[in-house]
């Protein structure tokens, strides 16, 4: 093609897009004005119907879309060749012109005398595929369950502005009145129309099943996981049958944060950038506490620990359970089933057997059926195949159980239900199972405590204390997830009280809204969960729904709590289908400058003895990381100097001073010296605020800052504390622009890293 004809083609596209921007803006403003006058359904006797709520949601999304398009019509254009599955099952081939608005979650088509202008939602799969596919290449999405089957981009453009005059970059064509790029800011942010090919592949993947997003620090794992929520809301009508298609809506969606420090940023991203209500966000610990209270109705005098443990003892107690793996889940469940079988076998000695003389024969018959069931059931390690859950047991003894109840007067039946409930909670007592299983595995418990505390506790004494508390029916915060996990699979799943033992809750009730089970559960930073938490949360979603997980198992930060693989998510998982699981590794570190990214690659290879699987962000240039070697008495001065220089930088607004291994005493001492030296400090352990942030890696997991000063790198290889290398890796991956390492001596670990990747200053 000649330069002249190429220029003509570009001129035509510019004129067309300018005209379409004006048409879209006028039409959107007109429709917005008219649309606002529509009334919502009035009060009804039984409240709004599902149809009413759907109409209101659609109207709300349309209003926001029209308002956004009227203000700034679109930010991207794609000319595409598509294949779509028609209503008759045949493929429809079509050449189309699409625009998209990054603030719209509704598809709008504005008709004009000469044709129409389609401004689509940013979540539209065709838009995302076209933007991430090279011109002339072909994206096949036949396996994704969408009516859209393939996309081939023919031309595309990204607009800085469209009105009053276009500023854009066209492919083919080049830049048209380009604007200077603005420096990116640190923090969690949406990347709606700027996703990488890997991110788009994950984003438009199957609209059900498990999606695990993994990859490098700063690769957008959390962002894409959250954006998938909006995608499922907006594009669920693009799904292809057959089969059950569950609804995706806020009421049936939950986001679980393993790191509560990320809560404010997560809520801001969901609400302000993705227009998703923040009530869907829950901390894992808070949910586990609530779940346990709803599930464990009769505790047989079990009670939470009242005394506060010393910090090291609390860490050691947490490590006993918190460092377990998915094999422990199966072995614990097997031990639990043996407990259940033994106690069911003793049914004839239960108090309820003699609760009513008039029903004695039937009650003894029920006890006999329960005992026979216990003797015939096979003990398993998979809770989903269990023959001894309350639900499975009820199905075997329902006839005898209902017959015994039917013959009782109301008051007697109520008393029987109460006694039988108490007995069931003794049979299925989770605390006895936890005490028996973990109390008998002394060597494993000692090993975990040693790793979790750096061998700073008397492991045998702490295990004895734990066993003593469990024997006294006392449990601590570290036990709650495991107690909840056992009850999740022990309790009946049926929500209808007539098809289960009475006075016993459904294990799914806490995961339901208006009688419907959650259809989408998202878990962020899953590597920081213990295996019981991960398995429990993953089991709550509807079998035909979606489970979205973001995790990087190289970024475990707690020495006493976390998991090394995603295997626990497969234990008790409810999702249907053999192909229910898909893993998407993100390959580009988009957070950090090229210089920090290269340094992180070098560190990764040395620390983990494997080649890094991520690429650097070539578009962001800044200074190399700086290693400063100075005697301990000079560290305060060095920190003050670095902070002072960074404060004067145009690209740095947030600075964090990070401890690799948390040490409250040494941090308090350092803060006192910094304050004496005149350094403005934010409150201790704060992750945001005015002044220098002083905190530990554990507390800022998932956050990012413009600059970081990292302390303690020289002690990493000699530390006996669990996951110290992982915490170091996380610390080095927090800053986006500047990284300084202050050490008393040259860190042995860095002697193996390419010296061209960082600068060294010695005093």
Image: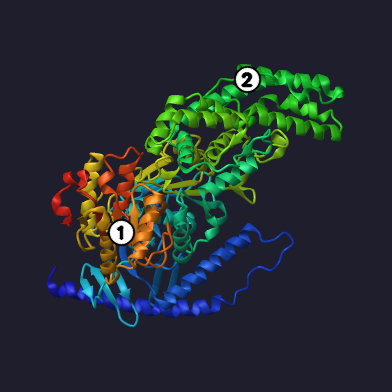
Residue 697 screen position, x and y as percent: 37, 51
The colour style of the image is rainbow
Horizontal arrangement in the rendering, residue 748 relative to residue 681 (left or right): left
Horizontal arrangement in the rendering, residue 326 relative to residue 41 (left or right): left
Residue 14 screen position, x and y as percent: 27, 76
Is the N terminus in the top left, top right, bottom left or bottom right quadrant?
bottom left
Q: Secondary structure at mark 2?
A: helix
Q: Nearer the viewer, residue 33 or 534?
A: 534
Is the C terminus in the top left, top right, bottom left or bottom right quadrant?
bottom left
Whether label 2 touches label 1, CB < 8 Å: no
Q: Nearer the viewer, residue 57 or 492?
A: 492
Q: Secondary structure at mark 1?
A: strand
**Residue at the image position 39 percent from the left and 72 percent from the top:** 117
Q: Which mark is residue 342?
A: 2
Residue 457 screen position, x and y as percent: 43, 35
Relative vertical location of residue 54 with respect to residue 496 in this rendering, above or below = below
Residue 135 screen position, x and y as percent: 24, 60
Density class for disc 2 (Cα within 10 Å; few <14, some 14-19, many ≥20) is some
- Res 585 seen here: no
**Residue at the image position 24 percent from the left and 54 percent from the top:** 597
- Res 662 seen here: yes
Q: Quadrant of residue 136?
A: bottom left
Q: Estimate the spatial distance between the alpha carbons at disc 2 and disc 1, rounded to whole Å.
A: 57 Å
**Residue at the image position 47 percent from the left and 79 percent from the top:** 29
Q: Which mark is residue 531?
A: none
Q: Nearer the viewer, residue 719 or 159?
A: 719
Density class for disc 1 (Cα within 10 Å; few <14, some 14-19, many ≥20) is many
Residue pointed to by mark 1: 708
Horizontal arrangement in the rendering, residue 754 relative to residue 158 (left or right): left
User: Could you tell me how many numbered marks the image carries?
Assistant: 2
Residue mark closest to the camera, 2 vs 1: 1
Give whichever of discs 2 and 1 has the lower sequence position: 2
């Amino acid at each position: 093609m000649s330069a002249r004809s190429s220029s003509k083609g570009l001129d035509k596209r510019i004129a067309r897009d300018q005209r379409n921007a004006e048409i879209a803006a006028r039409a959107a403003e007109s429709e917005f004005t008219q649309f606002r006058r529509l009334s919502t359904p009035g009060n009804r006797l039984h409240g709004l119907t599902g149809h009413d709520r759907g109409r209101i949601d659609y109207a709300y999304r349309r209003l926001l879309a029209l308002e956004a398009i009227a203000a700034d019509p679109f930010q991207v254009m794609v000319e595409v060749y598509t294949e779509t599955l028609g209503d008759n099952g045949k493929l429809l081939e079509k050449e189309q012109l699409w625009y998209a608005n990054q603030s719209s979650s509704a598809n709008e088509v504005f008709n004009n005398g000469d044709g129409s202008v389609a401004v689509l939602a940013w979540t539209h799969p065709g838009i995302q595929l076209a933007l991430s596919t090279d011109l002339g290449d072909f994206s096949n999405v036949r396996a994704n369950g969408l009516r859209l089957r393939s996309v081939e981009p023919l031309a595309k453009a990204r607009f800085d502005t469209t009105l009053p005059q276009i500023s854009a970059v066209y492919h083919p064509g080049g830049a048209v009145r380009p604007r200077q790029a603005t420096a990116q800011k640190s923090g969690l942010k949406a990347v709606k129309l700027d996703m990488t090919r890997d991110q788009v592949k994950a984003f438009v993947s199957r609209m059900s099943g498990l999606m695990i997003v993994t990859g490098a620090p700063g690769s957008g794992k959390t962002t894409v996981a959250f954006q998938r929520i909006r995608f499922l809301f907006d594009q669920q009508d693009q799904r292809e049958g057959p089969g059950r298609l569950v609804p995706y809506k806020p009421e049936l969606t939950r986001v679980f944060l393993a790191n509560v420090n990320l809560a404010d940023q997560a809520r801001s991203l969901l609400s302000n950038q993705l227009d998703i209500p923040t009530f869907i966000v829950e901390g894992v610990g808070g949910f586990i506490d609530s779940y346990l209270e709803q599930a464990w109705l009769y505790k047989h005098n079990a009670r939470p620990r009242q005394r506060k443990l010393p910090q090291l003892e609390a860490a050691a107690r947490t490590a006993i359970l918190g460092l377990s793996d998915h094999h422990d889940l199966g072995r614990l469940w097997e031990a639990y089933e043996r407990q259940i079988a033994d106690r069911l076998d003793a049914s004839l000695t239960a108090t309820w057997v003699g609760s009513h003389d008039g029903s004695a024969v039937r009650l003894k018959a029920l006890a006999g059926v329960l005992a026979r069931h216990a003797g015939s059931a096979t003990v398993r390690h998979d809770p989903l195949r269990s023959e001894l859950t309350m639900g499975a047991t009820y199905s075997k003894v329902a006839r005898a159980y209902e017959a015994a109840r039917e013959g009782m007067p109301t008051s007697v039946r109520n008393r029987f239900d109460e006694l039988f409930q108490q007995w069931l909670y003794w049979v299925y007592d989770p605390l006895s199972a936890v005490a028996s299983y973990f109390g008998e595995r002394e060597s494993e418990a000692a090993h975990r405590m040693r790793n979790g505390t750096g061998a700073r506790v008397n492991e045998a004494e702490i295990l004895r204390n734990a066993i003593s508390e469990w024997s006294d029916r006392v449990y601590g915060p570290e036990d709650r997830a495991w107690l909840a996990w056992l009850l999740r699979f022990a309790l009946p799943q049926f929500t209808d009280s007539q098809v289960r033992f009475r006075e016993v809750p459904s294990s799914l009730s806490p995961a339901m809204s208006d009688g419907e089970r959650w259809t989408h559960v998202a878990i962020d930073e899953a590597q920081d969960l213990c295996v019981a938490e991960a398995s429990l949360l993953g089991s709550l979603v509807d079998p035909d729904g979606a489970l979205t997980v973001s995790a990087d198992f190289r970024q475990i930060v707690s020495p006493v709590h976390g998991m090394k693989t995603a295997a626990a998510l497969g234990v008790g998982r409810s999702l249907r289908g053999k192909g229910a699981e898909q893993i998407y590794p993100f390959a580009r570190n988009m957070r950090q400058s090229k210089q920090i990214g290269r340094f992180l690659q070098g560190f990764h290879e040395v620390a983990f003895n494997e080649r890094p699987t991520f690429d650097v962000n070539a578009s962001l240039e800044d200074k190399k990381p700086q290693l400063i070697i100075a005697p301990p008495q000079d560290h305060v001065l060095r920190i003050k100097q670095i902070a002072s220089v960074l404060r004067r930088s145009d690209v740095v607004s947030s600075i964090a001073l990070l401890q690799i291994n948390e040490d409250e005493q040494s941090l308090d001492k350092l803060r006192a010296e910094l304050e004496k030296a005149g350094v403005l400090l934010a409150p201790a352990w704060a992750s945001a605020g005015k002044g220098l942030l002083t905190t530990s890696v554990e507390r800022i997991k998932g956050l990012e800052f413009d600059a970081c000063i990292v302390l303690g790198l020289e002690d990493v290889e000699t530390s006996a504390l669990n996951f110290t290398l992982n915490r170091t890796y996380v610390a080095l991956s927090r800053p986006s622009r500047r990284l300084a390492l202050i050490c008393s001596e040259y860190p042995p670990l860095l002697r193996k890293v390419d010296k061209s990747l960082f600068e060294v200053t010695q005093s």
